[in-house]
Image: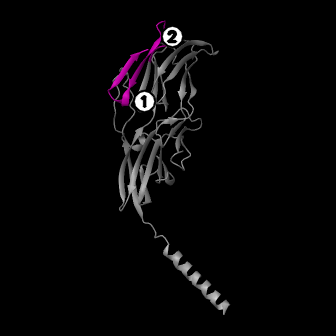
Amino acid sequence: MKKAILFSVMASILLFSCRKDHSLTKPIQKNYQVNFTVSGFTEQILGSAPGKPHVNSLKTDAVTGLAASIDLLYYYVYDSNGAQVSFVVQDSTSSNFGTIADHLQAGTYTVVFVGGKTGLNMNNTSKLGTASIEGYVPSYVPWGDTFFQKFQLTVSTGDVNQSVSLSRIVGELSIDILDKLPANASSITVTVSQEYQLFGFSTQAPYGTAGDYTFTYPLSASALGTSNYKKSIIMINTITPFTVTIICYDVSKKIIAQSVITNVSLQANTQTILTGNLFAADKGFNIGLNQGWDPTSINFQF
C-alpha cells in the first residue's frame, strides 16, 4: 500500500514538473530586416591647387563614390549590455560595398561603422567598452584616412532602412619646406612627439600611451636644388599638442639643418600646415590650420 501511494505521489510531481516547464517556454522572437546604406562622408580631403596659398584654399566636397575614399568598411552591432551581436566587414571590390543587410530582434542597439584604407585593423571588438581601432598594420602608425560613425538604433515593430554618413576622425600634418634642398642633402626626417595607436569605440577618442614616431624620406637626385618640398602625415592625435622636429641629413648621416616646432595641434578633419625655411638664415615655420577643410582658417606665428 505504501509503495502504491509513493509511486502515485512521484508520478504527480513528475506530471506537474512537465507542465510547469512547458508553461515557461519562451516564444520565438521575430527578427526584423535592417538595411543600411553608407551613402558617403560628411567631409572630404581635397588638395590645394598648385601655386595657390594653403590658407583658405581648401573646402568640403562630396565624394563621387564610397570606394573612391576607403578600401574597407566595418559594421558592428552591440546590444544594450554592450555585447556584440552582429558583425560584417566589406572591401571595395565587393559588388554590394557600402550596403549592409542584417536581421535584428526588437530592442535598442549601438551601431558602429568604421571605414578606412587597406591595413586598417580592429581590436577587442566583442564588447563595446573595449572595442577600438588599432591603427594600420604592420606597424599601426602612420594612420591612413579613417572615418567613423556611432549611433543608437531602436528596432520595434517593423523593418529598418537607414542611410549612414561617416565622419573623418584623423587630421593631416602637412610640411612645406620653401627653400631649396642643398646638393649634399640625402634624407629628411620628421619626428612627431605624441601619436596614439588606438581610437576607442565607446569614447570616440584616441587613447593609450602616446609615443614618438619618426618618418624618414630619402631624397632623389632630381629633388636636390628644388624648392617647395612637401610631405604629409595622417595622424589620430587630435587631443594633445605635440612637437615636430624636421632634420635634413647628408649621406654620412651628418645633420645639415634642423628645425623644432612646438605646440602643434591637430583637429579631426583638419589640415595643419607647417610652412617655412629649413636651410636659410631666416629659417622658421608658420602654422596654418584649415578647419574642416573649408574656407575657415586660423594662422599664427610662433
- Residue type pointed to by label 1: Gln
When the figure is inspected, residue 243 is found, relative to residue 157, above or below; the finding is above
Q: Nearer the viewer, residue 115 or 207?
A: 207
- Residue type pointed to by label 2: Phe
* Residue 33 placement (x, y as % from top left): 40, 60
Magenta stretch contains residue 282: yes
Local packing at callout 2 (Cα closer than 10 Å; few below 14, some 14-19, many 20+) is some
* Residue 295 placement (x, y as % from top left): 32, 27
The residue identified by callout 2 is 279
When the figure is inspected, residue 199 is found, relative to residue 287, above or below; the finding is below
Q: Nearer the viewer, residue 16 or 6?
A: 6
Q: Secondary structure at mark 2?
A: loop
Q: Nearer the viewer, residue 163 or 123?
A: 123
Residue located 44% across and 41% down the image: 148
* Residue 285 placement (x, y as % from top left): 45, 15
Q: Quadrant of residue 273?
A: top left
Q: In this picture, which residue range is highlighted in magenta?
A: 275-302
Q: Quadrant of the C terminus?
A: top left
Which residue, as the protein is rendered here, is positioned at the far bottom? 1
The residue identified by callout 1 is 267
